[in-house]
Image (spheres, coloured by chain):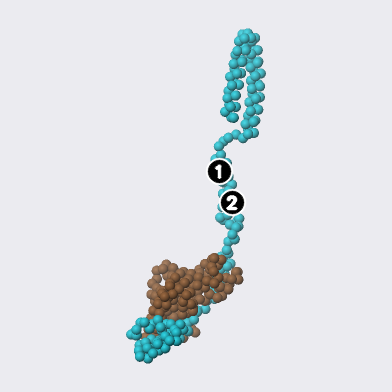
Amino acid sequence: MNKYDEKWEEQINALLDGELSQTDAELLKAEASDDRDLARAIIEAYQLQQAMDDIRVERAPDSLRKRLRAIPRQHRRAPLFNIFQPPWAAAFAVIPLVFMVLIMMQPNTPSTQEIEKARQDLAIAFAYLDKAGQFAGREIESTVGNTMSDAIAGSIIRNIKSQYETSKEKEV
Amino acid sequence: MSKRYRQWVKEYQDQAWTVARYILKDAQEAEDATQEAFVKLWNNQDSIDPERVRPWLMKVTRNGCLDRLRRRKESVEFDESHMSADINGPMHGASVSETGAWLKRAIGGLKEPYRSLVVLRDVNQHSYEEVAGMLELSLAQVKTYLHRARKQLREQLAEVRP
């Protein structure tokens, strides 16, 4: 083990790295002439550097070179947008499902056309009812007299009509 | 194949391999680690500054190797038997001189981050600034640690040399 002052260690490395100034190099040289351990450390450092020159970068084996060249083929980069890619395909599959759920969640209200059709049906039904009322009135009249028949048939028709009017108001 | 990627492979495959080889001390695992690093490079090539690809790649390679070491729960201490069993690696290159071969084993025996520092700076010849960036250390720390690592190697070399 060298016993020279540790402060010279940095100088030795700087010398090997070619980063030591001329002044510092002279100073180190002067110190080494008086310090055998330091002189030996400098010599050993040079020997190490020479040995380092023998072990430059290793050549990668052919098998590795082949593997590295194959990477682009084996790891194709995904395009930014591709409908056939699983994430996008899944998203597209979900869209109709979401629509269906939204439709199912809508309140069950009839359309305008349905309401109009129902009104027409109801008007026809009342026309029939009117005729039936008149027929019933004639039947009653023939049985119990004119005044009574008007009272009975008229009250039936008025009752049904008032219910119809109420339902219309509610719709409005 | 991306022309840019192909160029990076050509320029940096040997350096990345060397880093992996020294840290893992196992040829097959070093190949896997190097390949993983290049896969990451391929996948992230658009987000990496082209001027910083080399330090980025070395850092990713080293980190991948250290992760592997942790996973296999192997001590980072020098493993002589492991080294001598692997006859195809850099530790036993036929063209390398005896001192060079010894030095490779000695570098492999250094603890982290000394080993990575020596490999990156003295073997791969990266600048101090690049090494500091790769290892996420300050420039002063890099120099101090590297001095310690070199001193260890020097002293070991002095012991084996006549």
Category of crowding for the residue at label 2, using alpha-carbon neighbours closer than 10 angstroms: few (below 14), some (14–19), many (at least 20): few
Q: Residue at x 39, y 75 (%)?
A: B111
Vertical position of residue B34 compared to residue A123: above or below: below
- Give percent across and percent down for residue A8: 38, 83
Q: Residue at x 45, y 69 (%)?
A: B63
Chain designation of label 1: A
- Give percent across and percent down for residue A72: 57, 67
Disc 2 is placed on an element classified as helix
In which quadrant is the C terminus of chain A drawn?
A: top right
Q: Residue at x 50, y 68 (%)?
A: B36
Q: Which chain is cyan?
A: A
- For residue B60, the mark is none
Q: Which chain is brown?
A: B
Residue A24 appears anywhere in the view: yes
Q: Which residue is mark 2?
A: A92
**Amino acid type, residue under disc 2 in the picture:** Phe
Q: Which residue is mark 1?
A: A101
In this rendering, position of residue A135 left or right of residue B118: right
